[in-house]
């Protein structure tokens, strides 16, 4: 597909080894906790043991007696400087440190600043807080009941309702359901889960009182947007945006959990400003698990209407969303609640209606985008469960039902009933490829045989459509800042380049793939293109890395910026070769005269000339910047098939095979894409079979450590078998779509469908994830199998 020269320079489609891995595998990555500054102080946080309680008194006297403890900062202290309210990326907010009431288990209550980290921890243990516990709201279904405490009177609320959002045609959908031949209905609950990246959140806030300048070294997926937010806070103490620099160096996983601003960051800034020294705050593992980065907790009433022979006609979903005390994504506009409207999936039908109500409870702030498109996983789970449910109802093979209802290739661009314009797609071949690789027909025969012997084997499919990109700017913004992204390429006289981006890799391999895009467009070998992200003083403004948006936005910006430079190179080549621009042809790495290939100039010669011998009137140098505003989101898709065997004695579940066919359009680096898919599939296995945060009726988290919040490892993962089809994105400069989240979105329904399929002949129509051996064992007991 791409020429040999492209391979030599590490252009598109080549599995170039990740440039960044040399430092990672040698332990030379530079993370925020590696930062040590002269005179640096350490912060540790006192957290609430109650989900809902009045703070009667904070006695810091014993803590302050400990040698090395310098200060204990409370909400009342911050209030004096007007720093007690959090800034936010979205429209909801909370107190940095509460002044009178704690609202969730593990909430920050006050912070201890000390000369050593362990001394700060000793200080935390010595702070005495007197609480008056109150009965918390833990069940979202009861949050709106009369007599419940109003959790957010500060927001002018008179009940615990956050927002209502809806999309589609309610009237037409209700009418269709009233007259449909078949209606299937299930209550589908997706539990609260945690992002669980290897590196926890942390920062070093370094305020220089002489220059009145703040440098924030921190773990963030969106350095520029965070700087703007921090500038809002720092404004209260006289700082403005040009005096705030955010530096995000290497990040050990983000998965959406490093987009929000957490209280710890703001307290560290306040401490550094007040004391005038750098302050480091690094969460420990349990703090991270108990207080940050929660997603989901969605209870969905799902209905699908169809004809008796299986023509899907309509979808209706009503959702109750528990967002805890603060909604990390409270904006109910098209973004981010609207991402749920991808719930019509890969199928062609006339009408749909979906509505969602979000409520406050006394759980930690929720609604974070967990890898990373808000609510796409929930939406895909709903539709893919319901398609299997329909197949069961009408006795049709679930693959056949999908094939018959897929949007057809010739229908793209396709206008979904809930308002998206799917840019491109070709769903049948992806499912067929997965079926061929796994041997679908044989498996169904084997399943029928096994059932005769009482053995439990299931086959589950998920044919998802994803929506990724977080642009275009006409539909998406953060704090009013439009959702474009940027690339700046600067080529030095020797033909070596540096390129800077407004995004921030947390492990996705941007240092390699961005270089490949520029290499392809400009002919400079990828190994000679150095990529930088994460420093707001040097990189162009961008909105960051999440929602698989780096390729659709910054990747596109790189291609367009490189093309601007190629245009300049063409002008210089015409000048040097004394021909008109139209007489020149481009071959990766050089321009040559049409019909006279010996008359040519390499890109390196042309760049050198840009500094030494450029045409009169042309600006010297070889640099270009582009801010790319995508015309639409991108719509990657895929078909996954999972085969499970269930032990009928114990309920234990073994994934025998899992085949994943993904289509993310043009592939920049197949090895990196495969790595993304492997990691993402394991992250999809997590909620399907293992992860769920459990709270008791007092709002205590019952599985607040990795001993009992089960994150799957390679031991629990099956051998993922991957493949792809390629349907280029028509509006992206190189035809690429994002891929980072697809596997995490597609895996849970495929696994759940397989397990439910194994039990469906016993009358099982649905099981909520995570589907654990205990849940299956209970069903087997109930059905009389055990
Ligand atoms: N890529 C490619 N060809 C394509 C599409 C993507 O080669 N057609 C490459 C990209 O160039 C990039 C990688 O695949 O190197 C992922 O690209 P993309 O899909 O654009 O996603 P982002 O880079 O924006 O990453 C975000 C996405 C999300 S939303 C989460 S959450 C996530 C993820 O990616 N978090 C991750 N993958 C992660 N991987 C690691 N290791 N750590 C995380 O925190």
Image (cartoon, grey):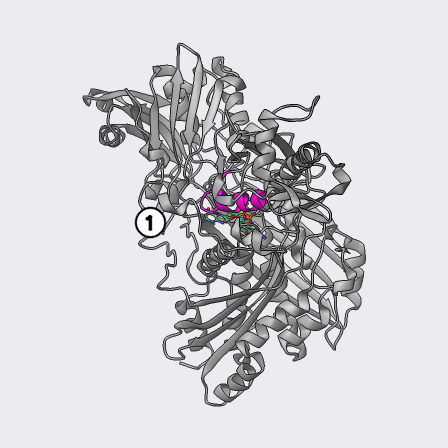
| Image x and y of residue 341, in percent | 67, 52
Q: Residue at x 34, y 24 (%)?
A: 279
In this view of the protein, which residue sits in the foreground, 30 or 708? 30
Q: Residue at x 63, y 56 (%)?
A: 665
Q: Is residue 573 above or below residue 598?
A: above
| Image x and y of residue 569, in percent | 65, 35
Q: Residue at x 76, y 36 (%)?
A: 580
Q: Is residue 545 above or below residue 702?
A: above
Seen in the image, is 308 located left or right of residue 532?
right
Q: How many marks?
A: 1
Farthest top residue in view:
210
Which quarter of the figure is the N terminus placed in?
bottom right
Seen in the image, is 42 located left or right of residue 7?
left
Seen in the image, is 628 located left or right of residue 757?
right
Q: Which residues are magenta?
A: 504-519
| Magenta-drawn stretch, dominant element (helix, strand or loop) | helix
Q: Is residue 510 magenta?
A: yes
In this view of the protein, which residue sits in the foreground, 332 or 668? 668
Q: Is residue 49 magenta?
A: no
In this view of the protein, which residue sits in the foreground, 62 or 575? 575
Q: Is residue 121 above or below residue 143?
A: above
| Image x and y of residue 686, in percent | 44, 58
Res. 713 visible in picture: yes
Kindly identify which residue carries mark 1. 705
């Amino acid at each position: 597909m791409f020429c040999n020269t492209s391979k030599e320079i590490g252009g598109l489609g080549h599995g170039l080894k990740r440039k960044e891995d040399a430092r990672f595998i040698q332990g030379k990555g530079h993370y925020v906790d590696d930062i040590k500054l002269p005179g640096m102080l350490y912060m540790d946080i006192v957290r609430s043991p109650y989900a809902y309680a009045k703070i009667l008194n904070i006695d810091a006297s014993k803590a302050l007696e400990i040698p090395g403890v310098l200060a204990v900062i409370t909400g009342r202290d911050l209030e004096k400087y007007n720093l007690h309210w959090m800034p936010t990326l979205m429209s909801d907010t909370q107190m940095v440190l509460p002044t009178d009431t704690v609202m969730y288990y593990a909430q920050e209550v006050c912070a201890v600043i000390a000369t050593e980290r362990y001394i700060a921890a000793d200080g935390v243990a010595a702070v005495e807080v007197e609480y008056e516990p109150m009965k918390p709201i833990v069940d979202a279904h009861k949050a709106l009941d009369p007599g419940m405490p109003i959790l957010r009177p500060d927001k002018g609320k008179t009940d615990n309702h956050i927002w209502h959002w809806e999309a589609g045609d309610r009237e037409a959908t209700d009418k269709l359901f009233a007259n449909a031949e078949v209606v299937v209905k299930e209550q589908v609950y997706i539990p609260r889960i945690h992002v669980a990246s290897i590196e926890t959140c942390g920062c070093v806030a370094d305020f220089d009182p002489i220059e009145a300048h703040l440098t924030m070294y921190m773990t963030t997926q969106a350095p520029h947007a965070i700087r703007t937010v921090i500038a809002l806070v720092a404004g209260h103490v006289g700082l403005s945006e040009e005096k705030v620099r955010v530096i995000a160096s290497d990040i050990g996983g983000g998965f959406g959990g490093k987009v929000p601003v957490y209280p710890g960051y703001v307290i560290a800034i306040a401490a550094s400003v007040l004391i005038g020294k750098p302050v480091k705050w690094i969460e420990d593992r349990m703090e991270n698990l108990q207080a940050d980065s929660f997603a989901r907790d969605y209870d969905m009433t799902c209905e699908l209407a169809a004809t008796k022979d299986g023509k899907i006609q309509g979808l209706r979903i009503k959702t109750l969303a528990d967002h805890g005390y603060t909604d990390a994504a409270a904006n109910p506009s098209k973004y981010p609640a609207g991402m749920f409207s991808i719930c019509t999936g890969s199928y062609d039908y006339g009408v749909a209606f979906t509505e969602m109500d979000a409520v406050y409870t006394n759980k930690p702030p929720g609604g974070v985008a967990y890898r990373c498109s808000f609510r796409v996983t929930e939406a895909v789970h709903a539709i893919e469960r319901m398609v299997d449910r329909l197949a069961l109802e009408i006795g049709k093979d679930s693959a056949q039902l999908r094939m018959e209802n897929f949007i057809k290739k010739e229908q793209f661009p396709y206008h979904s009933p809930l308002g998206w314009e799917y840019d491109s797609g070709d769903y049948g071949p992806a499912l067929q490829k997965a079926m061929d690789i796994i041997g679908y027909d044989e498996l169904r025969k084997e399943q029928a045989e096994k059932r005769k012997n009482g053995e439990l084997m299931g086959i589950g499919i998920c044919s998802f459509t994803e929506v990724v990109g977080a642009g275009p700017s006409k539909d998406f913004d953060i704090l009013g800042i439009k959702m474009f992204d940027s690339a700046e390429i600067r080529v030095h006289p020797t033909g070596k380049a540096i390129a800077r981006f407004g995004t921030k890799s947390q492990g996705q391999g941007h240092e390699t793939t961005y270089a490949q895009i520029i290499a392809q467009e400009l002919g400079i070998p990828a190994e000679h293109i150095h990529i930088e992200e994460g420093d707001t003083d040097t990189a162009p403004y961008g909105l960051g890395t999440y929602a698989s948006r780096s390729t659709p936005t910054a990747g596109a910006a790189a291609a367009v910026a490189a093309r601007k430079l190629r245009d300049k190179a063409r002008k210089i080549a015409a000048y040097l070769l004394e021909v008109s621009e139209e007489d020149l042809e481009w071959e990766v790495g050089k321009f040559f005269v049409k019909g006279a290939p010996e008359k040519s100039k390499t890109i390196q010669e042309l760049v050198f000339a840009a500094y030494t011998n450029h045409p009169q009137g042309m600006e010297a140098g070889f640099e270009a910047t582009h801010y790319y505003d995508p015309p639409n989101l991108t719509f990657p898709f895929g078909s996954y098939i999972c085969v499970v065997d269930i032990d009928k004695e114990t309920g234990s579940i073994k994934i025998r095979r899992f085949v994943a066919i993904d289509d993310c359009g043009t592939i920049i680096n197949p090895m990196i894409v495969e790595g993304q898919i492997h990691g993402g599939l394991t992250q999809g296995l997590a909620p399907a079979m293992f992860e769920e945060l459990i709270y008791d009726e007092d709002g205590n988290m019952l599985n607040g450590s990795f001993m009992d919040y089960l994150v799957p490892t390679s031991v629990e993962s099956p051998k993922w078998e991957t493949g792809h089809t390629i349907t280029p994105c028509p509006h992206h400069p190189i035809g690429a779509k994002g891929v980072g989240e697809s596997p995490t979105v597609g895996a849970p329904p495929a696994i759940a469908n397989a397990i439910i399929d194994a039990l469906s002949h016993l009358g099982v129509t649905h099981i909520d994830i995570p589907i654990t051996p205990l849940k299956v064992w209970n069903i087997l007991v109930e059905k009389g199998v055990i």
